[in-house]
Image: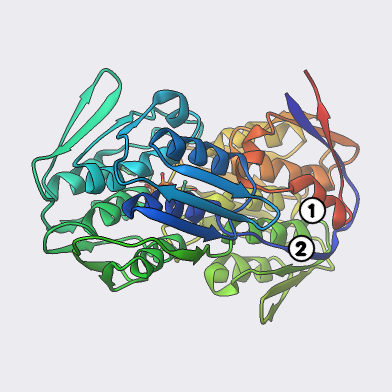
Amino acid sequence: MDAFEVVGGNRLAGEVRVDGAKNSALKLMAAALLAKGQTTIREVPEILDVEVMAELLRRLGCEVTHDSTESLVVIDVPAVLHHQADYDLVRRMRASICVLGPLIARCGQAEVAVPGGDAIGSRGLDIHLAGLQKLGVEVSNEHGYLKAVSGGDLNGAHIWLDFPSVGATENILMAAVLAEGTTIIDNAPREPEIADLCNMLVSMGACIEGIGSATLEIFGVDSLHPTDYTTVPDRIVAGTWAVAAAVTQGDVTIRNARSTDLELPLDKLESAGATVEILDDGFRVTMDRTPKATDIVTLPYPGFPTDLQPQFIALNAIAEGAAMVTENLFEARFRFVQELSRLGATIRTDGHHAMVRGGAKLSGAPVEATDVRAGAGLVLAGLVAEGTTTVHDVFHIDRGYAQFVERLTALGGNITRVDVA
Ligand code: UD1
């Protein structure tokens, strides 16, 4: 079991480049299933979740090669796919559920293990299933597997989502592109990763209008062809580096990042006292004072991303003043607060609100990463805590951050990966 030892006190300075988005790349890999032949996906991050998705695609019959030096994944999709995604992979990564839509579209049936709950909340599948049922899919839950069958072609339908669920929309989109007729998804999420998936599907021959808006119109086609596609940069990783610069009163230039995908978090950093300079291929964050506390309310895009909430709680913990952080997406995300309290943060939670009293002088202690973003938040806190913070269970961080230790070290952070078996 690996852990990170972080010694606080160093100011981060320099440049860091961001890879393609985890939350996009995993879905783009699943989308490759929709066309027989060889699809290439570029700017794929070298993280654990990508390995899990590659393994899942192999079990479905694909040949997958991941060239980490070139950051690309090549997926050779056979004419006939297996249609079962096993529990041993789905439980390692909930995003495996995104093969449901493409498998139904390609095979007329799919069996995907029910992922169960995870560290950040119960995360239902009702919106996924209601959408697929509207397209003519019959779904049952048997022996821990979701069994989905379409009796013939899928039929386009008008689908109103109860909530703009990212995962549900991805599954519905990947089924609808090969359905008979037109599908409309209303109250669709506007996350950049959804637009990225739509753009890849269009590059494969799909017909989609309204990309980036809350109404997606999908005109079904008979078949799709393989493609060569580059993943959108990871806004959450870019945002994590931005907060790291702010908490350490540093000066970090973040390359291959789209500031337009991070308007609200960057605005919050400016309210906290940082200077954000927009560059052609990214942005630069400088901070020359103790941050000021800033209220956060997580919401679907373009609202404040839940995946940057723990990092901002870390910032608020050391800030001047107090802030209210409201989590509207994942109820169990505040589990991380208990870990941060071990470093000396003063935070009180009540339901989906956390009142963070700033001004804490954090002191290093052993803590546990409870999920990927919580892990990042704890490392950021460790960077400003006095002494050594040992972050355990860093496999969570490895799921979403490529070369985290190396990149932090290059910026001047004092962090080491250790084996704590
Ligand atoms: C994805 C991202 C995650 C991000 C989230 C919101 C991946 C791998 N993960 O997760 O990092 O934080 O989007 O931007 O891309 N819900 C239901 N029923 C459903 C589906 C969702 O109740 O059928 C609820 C969930 O429990 C949650 C909320 O809707 O409270 C948002 O979920 P969703 O947008 O689907 O997020 P994910 O796709 O799981």
263 vs 347: above or below: below
- Which picture quadrant has residue 147? top left
* Horizontal side of residue 102 vs 289, given as left or right: left
Q: CA distance from mark 2 to mark 1?
A: 7 Å
Image coordinates for residue 355, horizontal then vertical, percent: 59, 45
Is label 1 in a helix, a strand or a loop? helix
Disc number at residue 16? Answer: 2
Quadrant of res 275: bottom right
Foreground: 217 or 214?
A: 217
Q: Position of residue 385 (x, y in %)?
A: 84, 42
Q: Which quadrant, please, contains the N terminus?
A: top right
**Is residue 347 something one can see in this rendering?**
no
Left or right, 238 with respect to 76, comes to: right
Task: Say which residue appears at 52% left-offset and 39% top-offset.
Answer: 333
Q: Quadrant of the C terminus?
A: top right
Q: Are marks 2 and 1 in contact (CB under 8 Å)?
A: yes
Dot 2: what SS?
Answer: strand
Q: Amino acid at mark 1?
A: Arg
Nearer-the-camera pick, 63 or 404: 63
Are there few (<14), some (14-19), or many (20+) residues within 10 Å of tag 1? some
User: Which residue is rendered at x = 45% and y = 57% of the image?
Assistant: 39
Residue underneath mark 1: 407
Residue drawn 76% across the image and 50% down it: 318
Q: Position of residue 273 (x, y in %)?
A: 73, 69
Q: Residues within 10 Å of mark 2 (few under 14, many from 20)?
A: some
Whether residue 283 can be seen here? yes
Q: In this rendering, would 242 be left or right of 188?
A: right
Q: 252 above or below 346?
A: below
Amino acid type for the residue under numbered disc 2: Val
User: Vertical placement of 267 versus 385: above or below?
Assistant: below
The numbered mark, 2 or 1, whose residue comes first in the sequence reads: 2
Q: Position of residue 418 (x, y in %)?
A: 83, 30
